[in-house]
């Protein structure tokens, strides 16, 4: 686990260094949205978008952007667990000249969960002790695909909406791994004028 | 006129609320976890706390889930508490679990801790085991070890076995009988060519016999045919979606080695707690003949029997009301 945290921290350092070398990059943005496995496993996700490289294709005037977005999602699976997902995302985003967004990317995420229930462990053959903050952690590589619309392109509103499907694999889970899915839907707000 | 509309709206709202699916009162609604040897196993306790009775549902599989059957077992909560326990690796259990812990002895140890934990939490409550299929094997493993019988007030057996050899012979007999009845000559030939005896039960290739049993209608019931159940499972159950389908390979030692040596027949003579045998009569997975044999070896236990004539392997799904009544009659 220590190695995993070191790897994630190292990955987190790369994009800001790259950014320093790319003065033409787009504005940074804050992304806030609903995050959950279903409507009954609800949560919230916040991410900070750092554009690494951006260019406009002359042929169709579509903007293509490569982003790094460290994010944090918190959700609740009632009577099961509360989950935290730290996701350093690398995203490719295409914004058409009409403002339509298509994006896909990868994130080597870290997953931590707290069991929602009082946890006991045997303390001798006949007694138990309570385990505080019981839960676990796992590596959770994630791939995602999303769509949205940048409202600043045609309506001059400094906002974009987006929705995204995440496909994740929790490693380890019990004796093997577990495929998880989650949905995101929210808005992206630029933090400075473009 | 505005007042009438307001009144009608309020009445409609009240009617809607009255129609909603309510938990029985006074309710117990606790989520406990048992952490043991790498596994975090949830135990959801729901129902009437004042009853001082806990029905511990010991699910089947191995690798099935407990809470996913609450949809069918909820009726029990009106007169008792039901403890829905997910065994290690199964259902919503989590953790980092070694495959080598998926053994009868470890499951039995877990079960012992679950019973003790429930006794700590509910010191005045009597605990009854409601065991289904693999859960029956697990319960016999538990009850025939040490003084564990003293920990529980009774056992309800639902379509589960006590002996692999007896089980496989019964499945073979069931399949052969059905093959003859359905005039399935291919099945009949295979089954006649591959008889099961006490001597070869531990070594014979059992999967083809099992597959014929299924093809001949051994259990046509699928939970996923019930749309309401599926919606409830997806949106209203604490289970982890897809988790149940991740670990079937982990049970290979159970399937290939340990279960084949499972034989509790001689030890069942020492069982002295009340036992109920609930059986779906049409079941081919664990035929009713296994229930009859179980009764014969329980020579020192008070045994009651309830047959479910319209059911296969899960009578609580196909004859829910009758099943609920049978369980409540047993624990009263």
Image (tube, coloured by chain):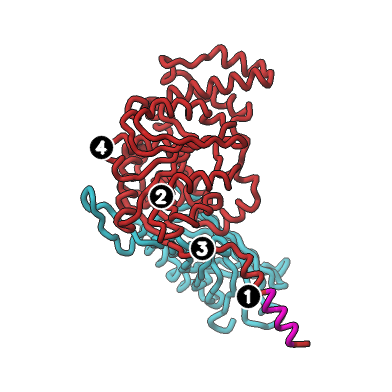
Chain colours: A cyan, B red
Compare residues A112 and B81 and report the one nearer the observer: B81
Q: Are marks 3 and 2 on the same chain?
A: yes
Where disc 3 sits, the SS reads strand
Secondary structure under tag 2 reads: strand
Q: Which residue is located at x 36 percent, y 28 percent? A: B299
Chain under numbered label 3? A
Residue B300 vertical placement versus A170 (above, below): above
Instruction: Tell me where the magenta segment starts and ends, as one range.
Output: B3-12
Please name which of the two marks, 3 or 2, marks the residue nearer to the observer: 2
Query: Earlier along the polypeptide chain: callout 1 or callout 2?
Result: 1
Residue A142: horizontal and vertical position, in percent? 50, 57
- Whole-Å distance between the Cαs marked 1 and 2? 36 Å
Q: Which mark is residue A160?
A: 1
At 35% across and 36% down in the image, what residue appears?
B103
Q: Is residue B172 visible from the viewing direction of this image? A: yes
Quarter occupied by residue B273 = top left
The residue where tag 2 is placed is A172
B158 versus A70 height, above or below: above
Say whether marks 2 and 4 touch (CB < 8 Å): no
Closest to the camera, between mark 4 and mark 1, is 4
Looking at the image, is mark 3 or mark 1 nearer the viewer? 1
Magenta stretch holds residue B8:
yes
Quick check: A84 left or right of B181?
left
Residue reaching furthest to the top? B193
Question: Extreme right residue here?
Answer: B1
Instruction: Pinpoint the chain carrying mark 1.
Output: A
**Residue most toward the left?**
A124
B172 relative to A57, above or below = above
Residue A133: give x, y in percent of width and height.
Answer: 33, 64
Which mark, by number, is residue B146?
Answer: 4
Q: Is residue A162 left or right of residue B305?
A: right
């Amino acid at each position: 686990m220590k190695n995993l945290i070191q790897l994630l921290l190292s990955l987190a350092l790369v994009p800001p260094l790259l950014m320093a070398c790319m003065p033409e990059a787009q504005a940074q943005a804050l992304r806030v949205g609903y995050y959950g496995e279903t409507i009954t496993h609800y949560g919230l996700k916040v991410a900070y978008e750092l554009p690494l490289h951006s260019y406009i294709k002359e042929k169709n005037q579509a903007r293509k952007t490569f982003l790094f977005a460290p994010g944090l999602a918190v959700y609740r699976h009632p009577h099961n667990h509360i989950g935290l997902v730290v996701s350093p995302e690398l995203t490719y985003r295409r914004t058409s000249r009409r403002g339509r967004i298509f994006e896909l990317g990868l994130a080597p995420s870290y997953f931590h969960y707290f069991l929602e229930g009082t946890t006991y462990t045997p303390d001798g053959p006949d007694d138990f002790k309570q385990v505080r903050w019981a839960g676990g952690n796992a590596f959770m590589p994630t791939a995602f695909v999303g769509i949205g619309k940048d409202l600043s392109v045609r309506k001059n509103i400094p906002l974009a909406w987006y929705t995204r499907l995440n496909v994740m694999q929790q490693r380890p889970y019990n004796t093997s791994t577990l495929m998880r899915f989650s949905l995101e839907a929210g808005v992206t707000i630029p933090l400075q004028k473009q | 006129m505005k007042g009438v509309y307001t009144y009608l709206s309020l009445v409609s709202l009240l009617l809607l609320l009255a129609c909603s699916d309510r938990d029985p009162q006074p309710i117990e609604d606790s989520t406990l976890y048992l952490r043991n040897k790498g596994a975090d196993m949830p135990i959801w306790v729901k129902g009437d706390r004042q009853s001082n009775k806990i029905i511990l549902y010991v699910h089947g599989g191995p690798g099935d889930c407990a809470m996913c059957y609450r949809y069918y077992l909820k009726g029990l909560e009106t007169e008792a508490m039901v403890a829905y326990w997910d065994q290690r690796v199964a259902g919503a259990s989590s953790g980092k679990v070694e495959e080598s812990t998926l053994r009868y002895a470890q499951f039995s140890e877990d079960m012992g801790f679950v019973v003790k934990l429930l006794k700590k939490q509910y010191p005045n409550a009597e605990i009854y085991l409601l065991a289904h299929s693999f859960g029956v094997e697990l319960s016999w493993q538990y009850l025939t070890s040490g003084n564990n019988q003293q920990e529980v007030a009774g056992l309800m057996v639902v379509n589960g076995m006590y002996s692999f050899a007896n089980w496989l012979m019964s499945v073979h007999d069931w399949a052969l009988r059905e093959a003859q009845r359905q005039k399935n000559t291919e099945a009949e030939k295979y089954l006649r060519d591959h008889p099961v005896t006490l001597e070869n039960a531990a070594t014979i290739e059992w999967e083809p016999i099992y597959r014929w049993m299924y093809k001949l209608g051994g259990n046509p019931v699928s939970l996923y045919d019930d749309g309401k159940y599926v919606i409830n499972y997806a949106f209203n159950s604490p289970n982890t979606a897809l988790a149940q389908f991740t670990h079937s390979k982990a049970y290979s030692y159970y399937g290939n080695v340990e279960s084949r040596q499972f034989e509790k027949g001689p030890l069942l003579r020492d069982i002295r707690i009340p036992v109920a045998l609930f059986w779906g009569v049409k079941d081919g997975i664990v035929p009713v003949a296994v229930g009859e044999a179980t009764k014969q070896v329980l020579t020192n236990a008070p045994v009651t029997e309830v047959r479910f004539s319209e059911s296969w392997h899960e009578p609580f799904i196909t004859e829910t009301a009758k099943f609920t009544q049978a369980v409540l009659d047993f624990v009263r």
